[in-house]
Image (cartoon, rainbow, N blue to C red):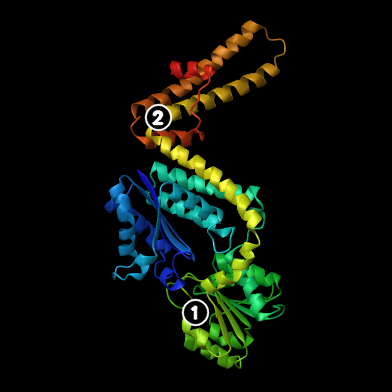
Amino acid sequence: MHIVAAGLSFRSAPLSVRERAVVADDEAVRLLRYLVGHCGLRGAVVLSTCNRTEFYVSCPTTALADEVRPRLAMYLDPAGGDDIAEHLFELRDAEAIRHMLRVAAGLESMVIGESQVLGQFRDAHQVARRAGTLDARLDYVMRRAVSAGKRVRAETALGRRAGTLADAAVEVARELAGDLRGRGVLVLGAGTMSALAARRLHEAGARLMIASRGHDSAVALAAAFDDATAVSDPVSVAAEVDLLLSCTDSATTVLSAAEVAAMQEQRGGRPFTIVDIAVPRDVEAAAAGVKGVTLVDVDALGDRVADVSGQRRAAVAEATAVIEAEVAHAIAVVNERDTAVPTIAALVRQAEAIRRREVERTLARMPGADSATIERIQQLTRSIVSRILHAPISHLREFADDPGVALTLRDAFDVDTTDDAVTEDTGGAAAAS
């Protein structure tokens, strides 16, 4: 059994390639079911964001794992071109698990430590759950990755300073366009990323105009800010616009170079900064050639924030240490799924620890209890533990050759340890079951 991570990211492919490989939300379920139902995979998840389209899959054989990359290339580029195929990366087993945890923690993001990717990762997990394309191993690693991402945000300086791509876009816009107080800023899109950008722009004192394909969503977003207005035609308000920030989920161009030229004509040709962080791009690349226009796409934005990321090396090292510990744990747990013995030991050990703790609390409230009473309490609680564990342990032994059963029971009982040493006291409970 292999866990494979494969796909495209800003590290492996330019924007012109990545935007062709985006998997829309309404396409994801069908694609995942195809991969599991027709390609022989045990599990499949797709994460498609502005900076990556990645697949995390569980393969029952090495031969199927070898087919993942060419199959994805065929699906993402049905015309058979080489540009997508040559930019596809593939990681397997330990390296795949490490990559998944690093992605969820924001360590593989363009803006290192950015907070939004954890939610996107969690959403990808839930889409796969709804599609029915999660096997036990892949489900475990996905949940472990989300947990690791939460730890990084809660326990490290990287988490405390986390930003988003929208934050970086606004900072770059301010560098290029100058002070935004009182200036007109047009935001294209009304989704999550656009809302984050609009909030930062509002805090910078900008006068917001919001445009979206769904005008009602633009009205709703504009209502969240003082003096913001919803507009239906970006070109019609060009004279009032000093900066344009775009992040829609449109599969096609929203503003053509001709429309940007028309806006510039209305603006009298004065300098015009456009920051487009959408993938696929909202603004036609040729708009960069319009006189007076500075067009920053998501890759250019990444180049501009790279130095900022370098200033956070200590925080990155702290977060990396957390992730490496989580990776070692996840790998050990996944590898031991081939036998029921460690899971039985972990279940017994966990139950015995709970039993002892509760007995100690009870006896602390019974200072006058004699030795006979204490022994009866000990025997009673051991018997209860043994009876509770009997059914799950019998099930584990019956299906010892199915690692998914062990994983499912570990998850159900919240058992997450790989130390299979069992103390003397736990031996009785295990034997009794």
- Depicted 232 relative to depicted 358: above or below: below
On-image quarter of the N terminus: top left
**x 36%, y 70%: residue:** 83
Image quadrant assignment for residue 216: bottom right
- Of badges 1 and 2, nearer the viewer stands 2
Q: Is residue 223 visible?
A: no
Specify the label residue 2 is tagged with: none
Where disc 2 sits, the SS reads loop
Between residues 274 and 296, which one lies in front from this camera angle? 296
Q: What residue would you read off at disc 1?
A: 283
Sequence-earlier tag: 1 or 2: 1
Could you tell me residue 239's position as x and y percent? 61, 88
Q: Are marks 1 and 2 in contact (CB under 8 Å)?
A: no
Between residues 309 and 26, which one lies in front from this camera angle? 309
Q: Is residue 74 visible?
A: yes
Image quadrant assignment for residue 86: bottom left
Where disc 1 sits, the SS reads loop
Could you tell me residue 349's position as x and y percent? 52, 25
- Depicted 108 relative to depicted 418: above or below: below
Specify the label residue 340 is tagged with: 2
